[in-house]
Amino acid sequence: MEMDRVRSHVRMQRYRMYAAGYAMIAPFFVLFLLFNVLPILWGFILSFTHYNIIQPMRFAGLTNYIELLTNDDLFMVAFRNTFTFAMISGPIGFMSSFFFAWIINQLRFRNAFSLAFYAPSIASGTAIGVVWLVMFSPDRLGIINNVLLRLGVINDPIRWTIDPVYILPLIILISIWMSLGAGFLTNLAGLNNIPYHLYEAGRIDGIRNRFQELVFITLPQMKPYLLFSAIMSTVSALNVGAMAAQVAGFPSPDYAAHTIVLHMQDHGFLRFELGYASAIAFILFLFNFSLGRIFMKMLSSND
Amino acid sequence: MRLARSREGIGNRITTGWVVTYALMILLVAFTSLPLVYLLVSAFKPLDELVLYPPRFFVRRPTVEGFLDLFTALDSQEIPFTRYLFNSLFTTSANVLLIVLISTMGAYGLDKIKLPGGRALFRIVILGLMFSPPAAQIPIYMAINSLGILDTYWALIIPKLATPMFFFLLKQFMSQVPLEMVESARMDGAGEFGVYRRIVLPMIKPAIATVVVFAFIDNWNDAGPSTIYITRQAMRTLPFALGTIFSGGVIARLAAQNAAALLTILPTILLYLVMQSKVIRTMAYSGLKG
């Protein structure tokens, strides 16, 4: 009797907690449903149609996907380029965003260092135009060419943004630099969130140098933030589009800077083939998802 | 004694390793800060230096004529400049505040209450994160249209509130707040909202400061929503307005344009510095030698 009352009291309390919880998550998830989930589902439906906004929609079955995977050579080029980006700039961006946060966090004048390091994200549009295009200008006046010419390393200017051989590496370099921001700031906040007492306890347990401290205390504590920055650097590497067009033009020489996002925007916003563009978006999504899964498996402790 | 010393910051111990580290890092940030430095010096360039070819990075004869020209240009506009400034400040701060509020509440519900179905919801948020934003643009426009909020401030605010990236980041930080603290607060009779506000929020301040920076930059510089969802000029935001004022490509206005670019970026830098001071501890944990 008494037991029953206690049990039902506990149950009541849990229901009350759940009710409060659903009320708290409701605003985010209602908006998330409206402006994320539904548009994505709508896009998924569109990918099985032919639709150009003006004419009525026509059901297309799997035609878009079949065309895309078997008959669109340019998509294959875009896919190969995007895959190369993701494989190189994703991991490098991920590791360097942690490495630089870790270094800068140990310096004096950390605020000034972090502002200067984060500057490209604050002035992202200016960043490409000003810094990279001036540095890698393909004529004799470009800073890099100028230096190399003077040193006698080369006799003729390297055509950085024109020659397909150099375009991809250049874009990889810029995308690493631009994608560092989010991961860097998150890792910096994460490093400052690790309780001091863990380090003190570690010292008592016999941790002797900075390297051991990094491996046994810092990195395990950083796991949730590392997962975040791993996923963000993958997503941003896979979504390179506007920047590549700004550096190498659109269409780029030999399509050396053609990416999946550019391919999608070309079909969606220039040719108004919305069904086809949506199919491209879904292939990109699957691609994103499979890489994301790998990181989740590697870095997730409980999920 | 040793423990106390170790918290004093590394700068006290000058070793070759640190000298090299500082030198390399100073070189690196000298490079990464170039775009900001360029914005700064360009705002004070006279017209002839701006149109110079090949372009010169630094300013030779600094002047404020760009700023004066900017204010003249803005004075001659039909809609006062302060109106755009207000639009930008209002929508950006509403965005940032609401993003932090709804995302932290949502993360609390999933991470600290462990709601049934919560794990599945979190997976869906991660999936949303992986979807390329340009792909959803047209359906989002249709959603805003069918809600009947085109040409209102709402259209500039609500579509961006549920951003998977910010939710994900806040949830990761929240997962580091020990559950025991939450449970003992519950034992003491605190309601869920009370636990969230008094226990959890103060502990994730660095994450909130980080999200504030991300969300502010995201909204402050983005002319997109103002271009797509708004047709009345008086409702538009700063980046869009500056874009149209200078859209004629009048070379005479080039100096004013550079002055405007600098003024636009200043609030972001100030906000960054204020927020960073909440993220970075005043006393560094310097670690051990070696």
Image (tube, coloured by chain):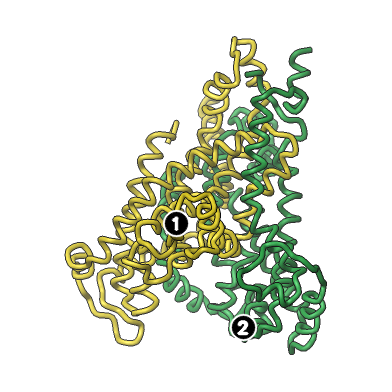
Chain colours: A yellow, B green
Where residue A177 sits in the image (x, y, percent)? 53, 50
Viewer can see residue B162 = no
Q: Is residue B75 above or below residue A168?
A: below
Q: Is residue B284 left or right of residue A297?
A: right
Q: Nearer the viewer, residue A193 or B81?
A: B81
Residue B15 or residue A228, whichever sits in front: B15
Q: Residue at x 22, y 67 (%)?
A: A72
Instruction: Report which quarter residue A56 is drawn in.
Output: bottom left
Name the mark on residue A240.
none
Name the residue beneath numbered marker 2: B247
Q: Amino acid at mark 1?
A: Asn
* Amino acid type, callout 2: Ser
Q: Is residue B271 in view from this perspective?
A: yes
Frontmost residue, A25 versus B190: A25
Among the 4 quarters of the image, the one containing residue B142: bottom left
Judging from the image, mark 2 belongs to the subunit labelled B
List the residue tagged with mark 1: A155
Subunit that carries the residue with mark 1? A
Would you place residue B65 above or below residue B98 in this image?
below
Residue drawn at (21%, 62%), measured in percent from left and top? A69
The percent coordinates of residue B61 (x first, y second) are 80, 68
- Please name which of the two marks, 2 or 1, marks the residue nearer to the observer: 1
Let me know if marks 2 and 1 both belong to one chain: no
- In whole angstroms, how far apart are the C-alphas of marks 2 and 1? 41 Å
Residue found 76% across the figure and 30% down from its top: B283
Q: Please, what secondary structure does the residue beneath circle 1 have?
A: loop
What secondary structure is found at the residue carrying circle 2?
Answer: loop
* Rendered image quadrant of residue A199: top right
- Give the crowd class for mark 2: few <14, some 14-19, many >=20 residues within 10 Å: few
x, y percent for residue A176: 49, 49
